[in-house]
Image (cartoon, rainbow, N blue to C red):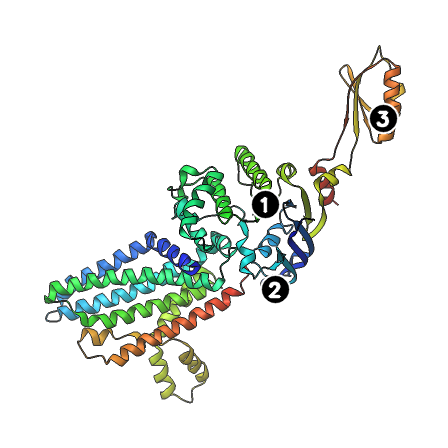
Amino acid sequence: MRLWAVASNTFKETIRNRVLVNILLFAIALILISLVVGEWSLGHQSKVIKDFGLAAMSLFGLLIAIFIGIRLMVQEMEQRTVYLILSKPIRRWEFVLGKYLGLACTLALNVLLMSVTLWAVVLVQEGRIDFGLAPAILLIYMEIGLIVAFALLFSTFTSPTLSALFTLIIFVIGHTTSFLRDFILLYPDKPLLWLFKAIYTVMPNLENLNIKMAAVQHLATPPHAVLFGFLYGLGYIAFVLILTVMVFEKKDLK
Amino acid sequence: MPKTVIQIEGLTKIYKGELGQKPVIGIEALDLDVREGEVFAFLGPNGAGKTTTIKLMTRLLFPTKGNILIMGLPLTSRDAMRRVGYLPEQPNLYGYLTGGEFLDFIARIFDLPSDRRKRRIPEVLGLVGLSDQAGRAIRTFSRGMMQRLGLAQALINDPDLLILDEPMSALDPIGRKDFRDIILGLKKAGKTLFFSSHILSDAELVADRIGILKKGRLVQTGRLDDLMGSRTGTIEVTFIPNKGRPSKSALQSYDFETQGRKILVRLEREDDLPSLLRGITRAGAKLVSVIPQRKSLEDIFMAEIGR
C-alpha cells in the first residue's frame, strides 16, 4: 500500500505537470505534422508517417526522462518533501519504486495517447488501423522506461545538469553500441580497446528495443525478437532500479 | 517512573568534507533521554546541531557513531516509526495536491484503512484550524497555513511522540500562540513532544525540560524550573523615602538608583534583605515592592552559549 501510495501520488504529480502536457502536445503535433510531411514523399506517405510518428514517440521519451524523470527526485529533495515521507514507516526502496512506477503509469498513458493519434493518422491515410505497429510501440515504451530509470539513478547522486548529460550520453551510446561492437571486431589491436569493450558490455543496447524499421516496412518481426526485447528492457530496468535503491539507501538527506 | 520515549547514547555525526574540505562535526557524543509525557525543547543557535539530531532521529541521516532508541525500539523498526509524527523545518508540501489529498497520501503511508482516513483527516484539519481548506490547492497556501498543514500531517497517525523542527519560526504572533496552545493541548493528552527552537520565549512557555546545544555538544540539560530556580538573580527592593530617610549615605553599601520619588535597591545576596527592610521600616519609609529577579531562559541560554 505504501508503494502504491507513492506511485499514485507521483502519477498525480506528473499528470498535473505542465511541462509534461507541453511535451505531449509537442509529440502529438509532430505526429500530426507527419501527415503533411507524408504528402511530400510521393508513394511512401504511410511509411513516412509511421516513421515520423514512432520517432516522435522516442523523442518524447528522451525529453520526458530529462525534464520529468530527473526533476522527480531532485524536486523531492529541494522542496524537502522527501523528509516528510522518509521519516514515516516506509522503506527507501518502496519510495524509489513508487516514484518509478508512478512515472511509468504516466508514461504508459502518454504513449497510449500518442499511439491512438498515430493510428488515427494512419487510418486517415491508409483507411485501416495498422496494429502491426503495436510491438514497436511496446518496445519504445520499454526504451523510455529504461531511459527514465537511468535518469532516476543519476538524479539520486548528482546535480540535475549532470544527470541530464549522463542520461543523454546513455541514450546516444545505447543507440550506437553496434558501432562499438564493429569497432572492437575490426580493430582488435587498438589501444584502449578494453575501455570500448567495457562500455559495450555495461551500456544498454537500445537497438535491441528498436524494431521500428521492421514495423514500418511491414517486415515480419519474429515473436521471439519482440519477447527478447521486452525481457531485455525489463531486466535492464530492474538492474538500474536496484542500483538506484542501493545508492539511495545509503544517502544522507542533509 | 515514566517510560523512556527517546534514548540517545553517544550519538555522533561527522559530515565528510567535500572536495578537500575538512570534515564537519554535526553532533558529538550526545546522550539524552526524553520521558513519556514530557515536552522537551532542544535549543541552540543556528548550526549547533539541532536539525542534525532530529534528522538522525528520523532516519534521514545515518549516525557516524552512537545509538537511538524510540520507545525502546531501534529506528529501523517500522513499529517505532508508526508511533512518531515529524514536522521538518519550514516544510514545502506537494503544491499540486489539495490539503485533503495530501493528508490522505500521508495517511496511506501509515497504512491507515480508508474509513479511518475519512474520519481522521477532518479531525486533524480541525485541530490545526484548517477545517475549511481541505479542497484548496496547497500551492495557494500562505507560509503559516503550510506550517499548520505540516503539523496536521505529523498528527495524522495519532502519534505518541511528536518531533517538531523549529515549529514556530515561520509563524506570526497569532500563529505562534495557536501553535503553543496546540502543543499544550497535546501535552495534556499525554503526548511526548520534542521540538527544536531558537525562539526562547516560546520554549519557556511550553517546555518541561530543555537541552542547550553548542557547536554539536550538549552543554546544558535539565528541568526548566530547576534551571531557572537554581539561578535566582538579584532582588529588587523599591521604596519611597520618608523625608529623605533613609538617607543616600545610609544606602552607600547597596547598588541603588533614584527613580523619581522612589529608590530602587538591587541586592545581589538574599541575606542582605532583612537588614535593608529593617532600615526602611525604622526610617518610616513606604515599601513599594520586593521582587526577586528570576533568571529567564534567555539568561541561561546566553550564559551557556556565550561561555
Secondary element type, mark 3: helix
Q: Residues within 10 Å of mark 2 (few under 14, many from 20)?
A: few
Relative depth, front residue between A253 and B211: B211
Residue receiving disc 1:
B191
For the point 61% across and 37% down, the residue is B202
Nearer the N terminus, badge 2 or badge 3?
Answer: 2
Label 2 amino acid?
Gly
Please determine whether, in this image, residue A198 is positioned above or below residue B249: below
Q: Which residue is at a point 33% across and 54% down the rendered structure image?
A: A15
- Which chain hosts label 3? B
Q: Residue B236's mark?
A: none
- The chain identifier of the residue carrying mark 2 reads B
When asked about the image quadrant of residue A41, the answer is: bottom left
Q: Are labels 2 and 3 on one chain?
A: yes
Q: Are marks 1 and 2 in contact (CB under 8 Å)?
A: no
Q: Is residue A74 left or right of residue B260?
A: left
